[in-house]
Image (tube, rainbow, N blue to C red):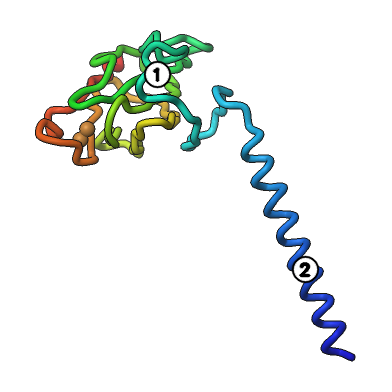
Amino acid sequence: RYEKIWLTFGITMLIVFLVVLGVGAFALGAQTPGEHDHAQHQSRQTVNPETVDQTAPFNELGLKKIGDNEYDAYMLAFAFGYSPDKMEVPVGATVHFHITSKDVVHGFQIPGTNVNMMVVPGEVNHLTYKFTKKGEFLVLCNEYCGAAHEMMQTLIIVK
Ligand code: CUA
């Protein structure tokens, strides 16, 4: 008899667990892409690498001011470079990077900071960073992507 009670309990818990998982997955799937989330994070959004540079917002690359010293930076990575290849922001700027690849998997890393993400064709990755120091920040590719992988870079000037 006890076995039966425990079995029922077990099955009930399993169902509850599955329902919770299902609701969680649904809630994640229902998030609207392109929304600004101010926490530092990486999230996913699907794009077509072939046409991404003709489709908003990636048809106009670079910085867009969205608030008081706060910017969206729309960027593309390709073999072997980034577009734009240079950006300038005031010191203290919060930059929300949105980046995708035209071809293969690239990296996006600013040495000396915690900025580090993958750049994947077909997906948009996001990362937020506040530039609290003046200087020139080199963005480098840290995923081997071909012959000129080491040459891949873009510059962020903070003044
Ligand atoms: Cu791009 Cu290595």
Residue 134 percent location from the top left of the image: 29, 20
Residue 154 falls in image quadrant = top left
Q: Quadrant of residue 52?
A: top left
Position of 80 relative to 141 (above/below): above
Q: Quadrant of residue 123?
A: top left
Residue at (33% x, 27% y) in the render? 101
Q: Position of residue 33 (x, y in %)?
A: 57, 26
Image coordinates of residue 30 in percent, x first then y, are: 66, 34
Mark 2 or 1, nearer chain start:
2
The three-letter code of the residue at mark 2 reads: Met
Residue under numbered circle 2: 13
Location of the N terminus (image quadrant): bottom right
Question: Local crowd at mark 1 within 10 Å, few (<14), some, or many (≥20)?
Answer: some
Q: Residue furthest right?
A: 1
Q: What kind of element bears circle 2? A: helix
**Numbered circle sitting on residue 52:** 1
